[in-house]
Amino acid sequence: MMELLAPAGSMEAVTAAVQNGADAVYFGYGDFNARRGARNFTREEAAAAVSYCHLRGCKVNLTLNTLLTDRELPAAAEVAAHASDIGVDAVIVQDLGAVRMLRQSVPDLPIHGSTQMTVHSLDGVKLCADLGMTRVVLGRELSRDQIALICREAPIEIEIFGHGALCMCWSGQCYFSSVIGGRSGNRGMCAQPCRLNYGWNGRADEYPLSLKDLSLAGHLRELQEMGVACLKLEGRMKRPEYVAIVTGIYAGALREGREPTPQEVEILTQAFSRQGFTDGYYTDRRGRSMFGTRLEEKEPRELYAQARATYEGQAENRKEPVRMYALIQPDQPAQAAAEDREGRVVRAVGPVPEEARNVPLTREKVEGQLMRTGGTPFLCEKATAKVGDNLSLPLSALNDLRRRVLDGLSEARRQPPQRRREAYQPGVRYENQKEPPVFTVWLRTAAQLNANLLKLRPALLYLPADEGAAHPDAVRRCQQAGVTVAASLPRICTDAELPQLEQDLAVLRELGVEQALAGTWGMVRRAQMLGFQVRGDYGLGVYNSQTMKELKRLGLIGATVSFEMKFPQIRDISKTLPTEFIAYGRLPLMITENCIIYNHCGRHTCNNVNLLTDRKGERFPVVKAWGCRNEILNSKKLFLADKQKDWQRLGLWGARLMFTTENALECAQVLERYMNQGKYQPNDFTRGLYYRDVE
């Protein structure tokens, strides 16, 4: 049966999930998980939670799914080592450097790839398998056909979200909260700006980024047939009553091989919803119907009271099946044993039975006493006793035997597995290069290329694969000017879209393009398979030296550091590969599967200037992304041409200028200014996050 994974933001929520039928729970402790705003756990609480869960047959996954700095990795290694020691069943990870650290320090602890890794294709899943992961959580935007294809071919387990909040942006690719408010979703501190009001034409009178909560109620049997290993419920920030309600409904449906009833869906709605639920991504029916906001409603007190009754006090709704045995023979100490379904056996010895004076002990009586497991987390599914003739043994002795074997079995189930534990070793540090970085240029369209830009001879020019294939003359002009062209790969490309991309890349290979820029793991693997030399883009979340080392091990020839880092952090990264940083441009805030332009006006006017307005009057350009997606860009341009002394000494190979809404003339003017040959300066600009602390 498909595993049901429930959220737990507190010990009370752990109890609520377990007592309502969760097969596994996930929670975080420390500062290295994607819900740092949740209460989370102390080390002692985490150990108690694992013990509580394992006794009752429930697994525990630890969330370690944020990007980590070099200074944070040793502390994260300690958290992981403690988690392994107390018996956590798996750790959920986003950061490739954290994966490397885990393989070194706790090699026996299973690793699951977080949805924050933006894995949305079979290539991405296979790369995760190559990295040693045993499971990966797919992006919530995938349709049933895409999930089914991946499940058929995946070499590791597939987990998907089945209920709870939906992010507007592809997970792991959202920078809205950090760029606007200094709180990073990649660091576990998302401020959820997507839930605020925005609009068009200067008015913030809509909620175009607020998706309804996901619910795949109605598709559970189909998911099981596909081979999905785990259905995940979202909600570590939610209260325990919510966890109890949602877990109970999905657990009951899965256990009984059915879908949640209309009455149960109504209960889910009462527990929490944003004007209902959506399955739009799964059914491939995107559009305005997927959006909704949280309305102010009265707390469902009666519903919550019923939910609390399922887990408060000494409630033991969850019963683990065991088999009980007894052997009572003359002149031998009485013996009893308990066995669980995993094959653990615990034995106990009692007093020697006496000859019966009145009513002798019977097999039925002994088995009846063994069956009495009330008040424990066990249910005796079968009792077997072998009792000699005309013997007597006090019921208190039988009860003591039963209690002792069940206590022993409880202790055995709580025992953590024996795992290796090694000291975390950061390894050798590479010296920063002393030369100032060269300039690279990223263009969104071939129309932004002109002779003036080529005369300035950037060291590398990135052109989207589809633009380069559609405009081979632009590629040739670059080559004739002595400017190397690299194919910029789509940030999102599903398996269904892959054939078109491969056609474009084949055209570029014929033109002599040998390098590619990839920002997701699926694109890294596919580009390498097609023979390209691959540079890693900012979407890979390069935040520490271990990620750099792992990228080199994977065969990449370059990397781009996250633009959520401060300059001193970038300086201190050990640069095992030629490293770029984003030095200019409108930083990407979101890439969305829903076309908010079409949702607003009913037409695809992506080539026009579309400006999304927030409540403060800031206007964010919305541009077309590959595959009929949207990219929301920052309202201000990142500008650092006058701060070159601050970033020329960071040991970087390249400073990338990203051109999105600029015309060809502006592109050349910006590059001139960065080469100290012009006077260009944007009217309104930002220094990005390089000088700011990001939570």
Image (tube, helix red, strand yellow):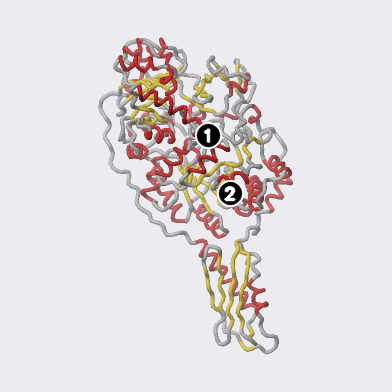
Percent coordinates x, y for residue 385 in the rendering: 61, 77
At 41% across and 11% down in the image, what residue appears? 664
Q: Is residue 187 visible?
A: no
Query: Considering depth in this image, is 108 or 305 the residue closer to the camera?
Result: 108
User: Mark 2 sits on what residue?
Assistant: 4
Upstream in sequence: badge 2 or badge 1: 2
Q: Is residue 555 visible?
A: yes
Percent coordinates x, y for residue 510 in the rendering: 35, 23
SS at circle 2 = strand
Q: State the CA–CA distance, disc 2 to disc 1.
A: 26 Å
| 471 to the left or right of 635 | left
Percent coordinates x, y for residue 300 in the rendering: 72, 42
| 247 to the left or right of 94 | right
Above or below 681: residue 9: below
Give the amino acid at mark 2: Leu
| 613 to the left or right of 433 | right
Q: Residues within 10 Å of mark 1 (few under 14, many from 20)?
A: many
SS at circle 1 = loop
Above or below 356: residue 612: above
Q: Give the numbered dot on residue 6.
A: none
User: Mark 1 sits on what residue?
Assistant: 190
Q: Quadrant of residue 379?
A: bottom right
Give the amino acid at mark 1: Cys
At 71% across and 45% down in the image, what residue appears? 261
Query: Considering depth in this image, is 600 or 523 the residue closer to the camera?
Result: 523
